[in-house]
Amino acid sequence: MTISTNSLMSLREYFSNQQILICFNGPISTNLIGEIGSALKEHIESNHAPELEVMDVFSVYIEMSQNIRNYATSHGFSDSESSATVVIAAAEAGHYAVCAGNLVEMGDGQALLERIHELAACDKAQLKLLYKQQLRQPHTQTPGQGAGLGLIEIARRSSQPMEASLDPLEPGRAFFSLRAII
């Protein structure tokens, strides 16, 4: 597909209407995560957002992006397989939506979806307790073993329960999407 000037204008209008601040789609590296994070932080700060809000959005973006990068690396995914889609947008009532998605093995995606639904059912006090319990667990160095402390931290920083979806792709794989409102 070739991007024309008309389609670029349409894309710009869509981004503006959806209040999308930053959007990325493609292979994600550690350096790129940092660069996008810096741009995100500067943009939110320029809107005179409270420092705690800036740090919450930044932290959730970093956690989601690093989880995607770590997962792709631990599974030996190629550049095209390790592509991520990350969108940060202004949301209702002065909040921000941090959304990220990536290719996963179907079983991993189903387990992650189940974990997110469990966390979505927890209130702030329960999330704090889960966080403390997870901190006391022995730390595993097994590559790709995520969805522990970081996911709980995203849930704790979110102003609403996280939302997630799993869209089947080729046999045994799916596209996992996660949305957090900060």
Image: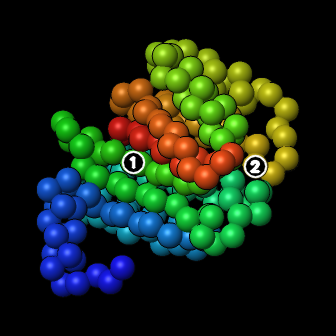
Q: What residue would you read off at disc 1?
A: 98
- In terms of secondary structure, where does tag 1 sit? strand
- Residue plotted at (61% across, 52% down): 170
Image quarter where the C terminus lies is top left
Separation of residues labelled 2 and 1 (CA atoms): 22 Å
Sequence-earlier tag: 2 or 1: 1
- The chosen color scheme is rainbow
Q: Residues within 10 Å of mark 2 (few under 14, many from 20)?
A: some
**Residue at (35% x, 38% y) in the render:** 181
Q: Quadrant of residue 150?
A: top right
Q: Is residue 50 left or right of residue 116?
A: left
- Whether the residues at callouts 2 and 1 have beta carbons within 8 Å, the answer is no
**Hey, which residue is sitting farthest front in the picture?**
171
State the residue position of label 2. 144
Residue pictured at 48% horizontal, 23% vertical: 120
Q: Element under label 2?
A: loop
Above or below residue 118? Residue 61 is below
Q: Is residue 117 above or below residue 64?
A: above
Figure quadrant of the N terminus: bottom left
Q: Is residue 82 left or right of residue 34?
A: right
Q: As shown in the figure, which amino acid type bears the numbered disc 2?
A: Gly
Q: Which mark is residue 138?
A: none
Mark 1 Cα-neighbour bin, 10 Å: few <14, some 14–19, many ≥20 = many
Find residue 110 and report its horizontal and vertical position in percent: 63, 33
Which residue is located at x 36 percent, y 30 percent? 159
Q: Position of residue 5 (x, y in %)?
A: 18, 84
Q: Is residue 181 visible?
A: yes
Q: Is residue 127 visible?
A: no
Amino acid under label 1?
Val
Q: Position of residue 151 (x, y in %)?
A: 58, 36
Residue 119: x and y in percent read 54, 23
| Quadrant housing residue 80 | bottom right
